[in-house]
Image (spheres, helix red, strand yellow):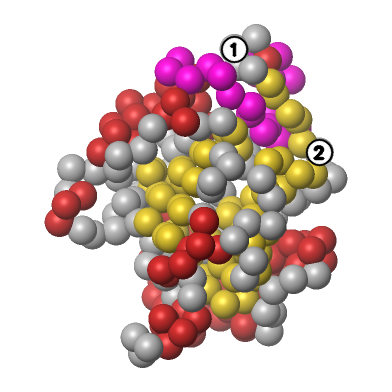
Amino acid sequence: MININNIKLCIVFDNYSFQQKSKTHLMTLWGFSCYIETPETTLLFDTGSNGRVLLENIKHLNKDINKIKTLFLSHHHWDHIGGLDSIIELNPDLDIIAPSSLSKLYIKDLQSMVKDVQVIDQKSVPICDSMYSTGIMGDDVEEQSLIIDTSEGLIIITGCAHSGIVEIAQQSQTLFKKKILLLMGGFHLMDAEDEQINQVISQLKKMDITYVFPTHCTGDRAKELFKHAYHSYYIEGGLGRVIQGDRDLTDQSKKDKV
């Protein structure tokens, strides 16, 4: 497992903006991508919807495309794989973790362009440096999520949570028998009514989850209700948001801010 002090997450593509004066040059578009750093590896989770914008955001956030060793694709929708070609063009020395829902012809093309392509089915598998795929989940949209096993609990990152954010959290806990330190990414509640959102929140509150970080396709209303429910354990997301384990995921530091 990874020591929580040694993990850093940075949102490099999102339709929400994390407002900071120094980051006003970042461009928001529909989609999601997260740059993940540990002492052992650098992984890019999804690539947003536009390669040019993704590259510019990565540059302005002082991240290095050439350091990326693994590219994890949650599912086949355009707002998560749109920047894929742009990343490969600059750094073909990649291992791609692809869901089996991607076109077989597309996967074949990718295999000719990068170092390796690992195709994921329903089985959870290790990826690298204490990172794992949940395995493919869902029927209408088959999607995998990323699990990071840390010293303080699991970090779960979702693309759109098409299979259900509750189901993804439950699957992760079943696999690892550990608490969830951070649940982040798209929760896919943008079209949900308050009753459904509150039901999701109620189910998650019954689980051992410390922090929630909803963004991308979660929706404004859902984000508002999550913030009300989780108080200081709600983390505001958006493009440019950086989460540093020892600074942002320590219970006492959050309690002191209440």
Label of residue 113 in the image: 1
Q: Which of marks 2 and 1 is in front?
A: 1
Dot 2 or dot 1: first in sequence order is 1
Answer whether residue 41 is visible to the viewer in this image.
yes
Residue 183 sits above or below residue 148 on the image? below
Q: Is residue 101 visible?
A: no
Residue 174 located within the stretch drawn in magenta: no
Asked whether 170 or 78 is in front, the reply is 170
Circle 1 packing at 10 Å, graded few (<14), some (14-19), many (20+), is some
Q: Is residue 33 above or below residue 198?
A: above
The residue where tag 2 is placed is 121
User: Mark 2: which amino acid?
Assistant: Asp
At a point 47% along the width and 31% down the height, the residue shown is: 67
Q: In this view, does 91 lie to the left or right of 151?
A: left
- In depth, the one of 7 and 46 nearer the eye is 7
Element on which disc 2 rests: loop
Q: In which quarter of the image is the N terminus?
A: bottom right
Q: Residue 51: image x %, image y %?
A: 39, 27
Asked whether residue 106 is drawn in magenta, I would say yes
Residue 124 image offset from top left, x and y in percent: 80, 48
Dot 2 crowding, Cα within 10 Å, few <14, some 14–19, many 20+? some
Which amino acid lies under the numbered mark 1 shown in the image of this protein? Met
Residue 63: which quarter of the image?
Answer: top left
Residue in the image at 58% along x and 42% along y: 40
The region drawn magenta spans 89-110
User: Residue shown at 50%/26% (left/top)?
Assistant: 84
As drawn, the residue found furthest toward the top would be 112
In front of the other: 100 or 38: 38
